[in-house]
């Protein structure tokens, strides 16, 4: 959820309101669950998405920490979130294409304020 907020600029409540955003969250969670399951942890992507949606609804219009970092032009923790899923997938010969794309796009946001 954090990288999605950083890229869209949407707070928690508005992320859920946009039907175009939830499928991206679903794909990220599916990749995270695949890595967790590959490492012996039982994780249901559907249950995790439900948990995330519940948490987002409970926090209303709060801003995610990564969105706050982007707005303040601070380096984000994306490498330790979706970037780590990419590294984990590659270490076992797999892929996490949505996490890779999101990570690259957040890095692009970071680069945009450093090079301008």
Image (spheres, rainbow, N blue to C red):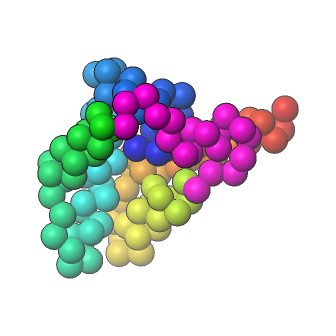
- Residue at image position (34%, 48%) is 28
Residue 73 appears left or right of 82: right
Q: Residue 98 appears at what percent x and percent y? A: 39, 46
Q: Is 105 drawn above or below residue 43 in the view shown?
A: above
Q: Quadrant of the N terminus?
A: top left
Residue at the right extreme, as displayed: 116
Q: Residue 87 appears at what percent x and percent y? A: 46, 67
Residue at the bottom extreme, as displayed: 40
Q: Is 9 drawn above or below residue 77 in the view shown?
A: above
- Residue at image position (15%, 51%) is 47
User: Can residue 15 be seen in this snapshot?
Assistant: no
User: 97 or 35, which is in the foreground?
Assistant: 35
User: 95 or 53, which is in the foreground?
Assistant: 53
Q: Quadrant of the C terminus?
A: top right
Examine the image and state in which quarter residue 85 appears.
bottom left
- Residue at image position (77%, 36%) is 113
Q: Say if the magenta span includes residue 64.
A: yes
How many numbered circles does the render carry?
Answer: 0
Magenta residues span: 59-77
User: 58 or 88, which is in the foreground?
Assistant: 58
User: Can residue 95 be seen in this snapshot?
Assistant: yes
Q: Residue 114 appears at what percent x and percent y? A: 81, 41
């Amino acid at each position: 959820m954090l990288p999605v907020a950083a890229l869209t600029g949407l707070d928690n409540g508005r992320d859920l309101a946009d039907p175009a955003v939830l499928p991206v969250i679903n794909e990220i969670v599916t990749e995270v669950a695949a890595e967790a399951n590959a490492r012996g942890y039982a994780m249901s992507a559907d249950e995790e998405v439900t948990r995330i949606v519940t948490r987002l609804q409970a926090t209303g219009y709060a801003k995610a920490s990564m969105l706050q970092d982007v707005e303040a032009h601070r380096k984000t923790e994306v490498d330790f979130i979706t970037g780590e899923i990419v590294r984990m997938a590659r270490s076992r010969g797999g892929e996490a294409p949505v996490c890779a794309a999101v990570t690259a796009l957040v890095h692009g946001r970071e680069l945009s304020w450093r090079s301008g």
